[in-house]
Amino acid sequence: MRTMFDATGMLTKSLLSATPDADPDSDDGAQQRYRTIFISDVHLGTPGCQAAALLDFLRAHPSDKLYLVGDMVDGWQLRRRWFWPQSHNDVVQKLLRRARKGCQVIYVPGNHDEFAREFIGHQFGGIEVVSEAVHTTADGRQLWVIHGDYFDAVVQCARWLAYVGDNLYEFTLKLNRYLNSLRARLGLPYWSLSAYLKHKVKSALNYVTDFEVAVASEARRRGHQGVVCGHIHRAEMRDINGILYCNDGDWVESRTALVEHFDGTLELVHWSPGNEVPNRAHAAAAPQLTEGVTA
Ligand SMILES: [Mn+2]
């Protein structure tokens, strides 16, 4: 555990030495306000984290409520190698400022930021740390909010296996960055290797479906109308046996968030690089996403 304390110590030091954000307290550039935003799997502290894109998204979209659905900081990676650029600080500063400005920010730690689970029941600069939450939509639906790693048999049963998987995943992301810098030089658009690979192996493993069904079943058992989770880096919104299953995706590959409009309508949004307006998450880039499900 000692290394973890070293990591959090360095993190604290970095945050304290943070330079102020360029656009303090302004919602300049705000495009659309949402009632609620759910984001997860940002993995601050890793080179794969798309912090700049997330900052753009947050600037463009103020909200009354913001749920941080776990794996916000990647303690597993930071323990191995310290990586904390300014843009990652800026995300933390942005979240703290948002809380200070009256947005209710709720943080449900995941497995990669499990160090934060020690602080469940406490507040940090107005950010509430909880193990799970129940969100009531404007139209009265109760959504269970969890990270989702509890349902991950791999993480639960054999942690070392999860670490191996994590290394492989990191390698894929590295390869992905290399391929895409090559593609960019050739004038080709961005293409996600790991998203492609995950798609390919899905039918073989059926892991994603098992995860989704397990999470939805537990939400039903607890008497909720739906569930919001992250963890598997696969944005989704669909009905599973009468339960609305929502996965807000990630900010490593897909740059997705789940948002609630003021009438209670839920929507998955995909933040495209260079785009001022988020595309509705569907079509070619991510065929598994459904648009505007309100069930
Ligand atoms: Mn996770």
Image (spheres, grey):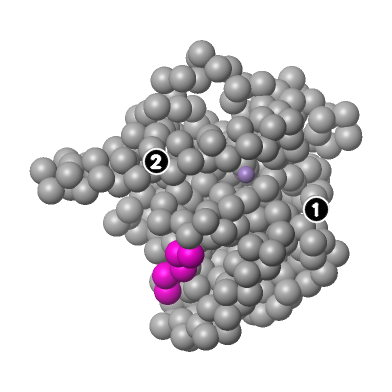
Ligand 1 visible in quadrant: top right
Distance from Cα at disc 1 to Cα at disc 2: 30 Å
- Is residue 22 visible in the rendered image? The answer is yes
What is the residue that sits farthest to the left in this orientation?
Answer: 186
* Amino acid at pointer 1: Ser
Asked whether residue 145 is drawn in magenta, I would say no
Residue at numbered disc 2: 171
Q: Residues within 10 Å of mark 1 (few under 14, many from 20)?
A: some
Per the picture, the main secondary structure of the magenta-coloured stretch is loop
In the picture, which quadrant includes the C terminus? top right
Front disc: 1 or 2: 2
Tell me if I can see residue 94 in this picture. no
Contact between marks 1 and 2 (CB within 8 A): the answer is no
Q: Specify few, some or many for label 2: CA neighbours under 10 Å numbering under 14, 14-19, or 20 or more.
A: few
Task: Quadrant for residue 267, please give it.
Answer: top right
Q: Residue 237 occupies which quadrant of the picture?
A: top right
The magenta-colored residue range is 82-87
User: Please, what secondary structure does the residue beneath circle 2 have?
Assistant: helix
Q: Nearer the viewer, residue 133 or 13?
A: 13
Query: Looking at the image, which residue sits at the far right?
Result: 222
Depth check: give the residue in front, 31 or 52.
52
- Image location of residue 2, percent across then percent down: 69, 64
Give the label on residue 131, or none: 1
How far from the left and from the top, in percent, is residue 182?
17, 44
Residue drawn 49% across the image and 27% down it: 288
Note whether 43 is above or below 141 in the view shown: below
Label 1 or label 2, whichever comes before in sequence order: 1
